[in-house]
Amino acid sequence: MTPLILISAFVTSYMCYVQGQSTCNGQCVVIKQCPALNEIASKPPPLSQKDLETLRKAYCGYQGNIPKVCCPPKPAVDDNACIDADGQFGKCVGVYSCPHMVKLLTETPIAPENYNYIQNSRCEGKDNYNVCCGPGRLATPSIPTDCAPTIAPPDRNSECCGREGSQGNRIFGGNATYVDQYPWLTLIEYRGRSDDRIKLLCGASLISSKYALTAAHCLVGPVQSIGTPINVRLGEYDKSNDGPDCVLTEGQGKDCTNGVTIIPIEKSIPHPMYDHRSSAKRHDIGLLRLKDFAPYDDFIRPICLPSSDITANPPDKLRLLTAGWGATDERHSDSAIKLHVALPYVTLQQCQNLYSMERGSLQLSQGQMCAGGEKGKDSCKGDSGGPLMYENRSERSLSGYFEIVGVVSFGPRICGQEKIPGVYTKVSEYLSWIRSNIKP
């Protein structure tokens, strides 16, 4: 709607709605400062009668020649809201303030599954040990017949996370993926500060239909001088192609995506303890809350959150996966198509020793983990903020499922340098923070 038409709509409003009206339950502000009403006014004309009525009733005066509206207050967000281990919403309280948790703790001995449930329900609160107290543990978690979009990350047993359409043999070492492989991979679109153009500077991982996990350095710090994160891009395979992406399959058939889905970012949530000035990049993790629900299909699905700390008892010769397009900064991009690579796990102590030689006084923490160190193989093949993945085959399912165990943080000065692994934020260390920041 043009400013002239918008002003005309306000001028014809009821005379009782005047500047400084006492009936305004929100704030009388310039319309551009009220996202809810500005979104209505920005729709292409003609507006519906309902939209015109909404704008007309919101009128409360002018600032110069710019209309002002009574902007409704934002709904209150419960800071104590969280999700428990079953993906149910609850409140973050001290463990002894949650009756069904207390009941589990009084059992002798505590069953391992109950202990894991309590551990996986931890959240960040005011007590020494806080849990997300939901409606109570599900004796037999319900397995959905279809994977409907949800705000909370899906339970791994539901088969609604960490699954992909590809079942063929994979080739590692920075090679192209299948078109429907790693459907949780996400690109963050930034609005350039200097030229207003869209830039792809970081990656993320879809963990539910409403949230994506990324690195804090993709949200705050030097990246802010380049651009502002505004959208996520889902279902991407070939960045150089605007429409659906197709690849040949066995038997000379074609497998085609549905094209990309772009969803605006409602809120960026970097970890509050992340310090972009520190070379150690501790707490380099963040969440993106999406404005709309991501639709699930063969090319858009969430990855599972980790069921445990893989570094506590790693399997022999553990190899982890990273994937993406190599969008590491504004000027460099390794590939137009999605790539992946397998990397050897490196213990934190080994990693610390190697970085002590590489960067002197750099001190790694328990919230970090390392992988890589093979020549020519590194998370340069993935994206900054993208996932480090573990394919968990310990369950009954033959195909297994993927967990996001790390978030790409930083690496050696020369990418793919031999004997110098990449450093990742360890996701299991931040599960309580993630649960505390996913809101209804």
Image (cartoon, rainbow, N blue to C red):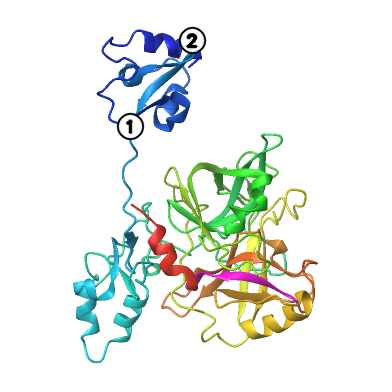
Q: How many marks?
A: 2
Q: Is residue 198 magenta?
A: no
Residue 415 to residue 347: above or below: above
Residue 233 to residue 271: above or below: above
Instruction: Look at the numbered disc 2 and give the secondary structure of its residue.
Output: helix
- In the drawing, does residue 389 fall left or right of residue 382? left
Read off the residue under disc 2. Answer: 4
Question: Residue 72 — which label?
Answer: 1
Instruction: Look at the numbered disc 1 and give the secondary structure of its residue.
Output: loop
Closer-to-camera residue (406/340): 406
The residue lying at 57 percent from left, 58 percent from top is 216
Residue 289 to residue 145: above or below: above
* Distance between the alpha carbons at the discs numbered 1 and 2: 24 Å
Q: Is residue 426 magenta?
A: yes
Give how far across and how far down residue 187 sits, in percent.
Answer: 60, 50
Closer-to-camera residue (270/108): 270
Residue range of the region highlighted in magenta in the rendering = 420-428
Circle 1 crowding by C-alpha within 10 Å: few under 14, some 14–19, many from 20: some
Q: Earlier in the sequence, mark 1 or mark 2?
A: 2
- In the drawing, does residue 317 fall left or right of residue 100? right
Closer-to-camera residue (53/178): 53
Q: Kindly report the secondary structure that dominates the magenta region of the rendered protein.
A: strand
Question: Residue 12 — which label?
Answer: none
- In the drawing, does residue 23 fall left or right of residue 323? left
- Answer whether residue 28 is visible to the viewer in this image: yes
The residue lying at 59 percent from left, 48 percent from top is 188
- In the drawing, does residue 391 fall left or right of residue 52? right
Give how far across and how far down residue 355 sits, in percent.
Answer: 73, 78
Quadrant for residue 325, please give it: bottom right
